[in-house]
Amino acid sequence: MGSDPVEKPALLVIDMVKDNFVEAKNLPITPFARKIIEPINRLAEAFRRQGWPVIYSTDSFHEGDFIFKGRMKPHSLAGTEGAEIIDELNRQPEDLWLPKPRFSAFFGTDLDQWLKSRGVTLCAVGGIATNFCVLTTVMDALCSDFKAVLLEDCSATWSEEVHNQTLNIYRRNPLHPLFRIAGSGELLKDLGV
């Protein structure tokens, strides 16, 4: 992957929204999500130094959305503060903020065209939750003909066990090296940074 001199990556940070970080809500994912803020900030800065795109894609739901007909309660509603990117992430003016109507950053957006117009060939994906929105974004990156890396140290879910189980399912997969699990340091080393 890194040996390919024409590889151009983009970093996709998924659903690091204020609604998921409200301590009063006592969400099981919040303590795990806090641990990935610093690794995401470090990786985003490394990408910016190389001139590689950094995209923050966040849930942007509507009160009556189909997905709220199950157990999931309304959150990250379009136009509310809760759907905004958390302040602890060091987002820069050149970074793209891409609200999304469903789980994947590719669904209902023009992300694939935006990336292809910039010559991107690989999507490095982190954020929350590993086993939902991060994973669906990885899968849709592959379906859009991008290589994909699920960033193990920049992703989290509501338990360490579920996070690791999800990663372990895909550590050895038939799409390797088009799809792989890697830490941020390993990814940067493979990309020659």
Image (tube, grey):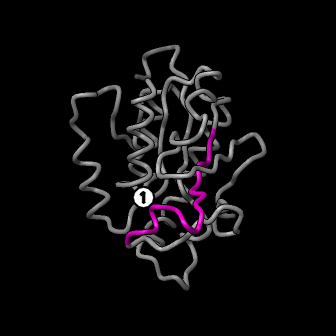
x, y percentage for residue 77? 62, 65
Occupied quadrant, residue 18 = bottom right
Occupied quadrant, residue 161 = bottom left
Q: How many marks?
A: 1
> How busy is the neighbourhood of tag 1: few (under 14 within 10 Å), some, or many (20 plus)?
many
Residue 19, relative to residue 132: is it above or below?
below
x, y percentage for residue 6? 52, 14
Query: Residue furthest toward the top?
Result: 5
Q: Quadrant of the N terminus?
A: top left
Q: Residue shown at 41%/40% (left/top)?
A: 138
28 vs 171, left or right, is: right
Residue nearest the observer in this picture, 129 or 83:
83
Occupied quadrant, residue 136 = top left
Q: Residue shown at 66%/61% (left/top)?
A: 78
Reply yes or no: does residue 176 show up in magenta: no
Residue 162, relative to residue 40: is it above or below?
below
Query: Residue furthest toward the bottom?
Result: 24
Q: Residue shown at 50%/14% (left/top)?
A: 5
Looking at the rendered structure, the secondary structure element under dot 1 is loop
Q: Which residues are magenta?
A: 54-70
User: Disc 1 marks which residue?
Assistant: 129
Q: Quadrant of the C terminus?
A: top right
Residue nearest the observer in this picture, 51 or 53:
53
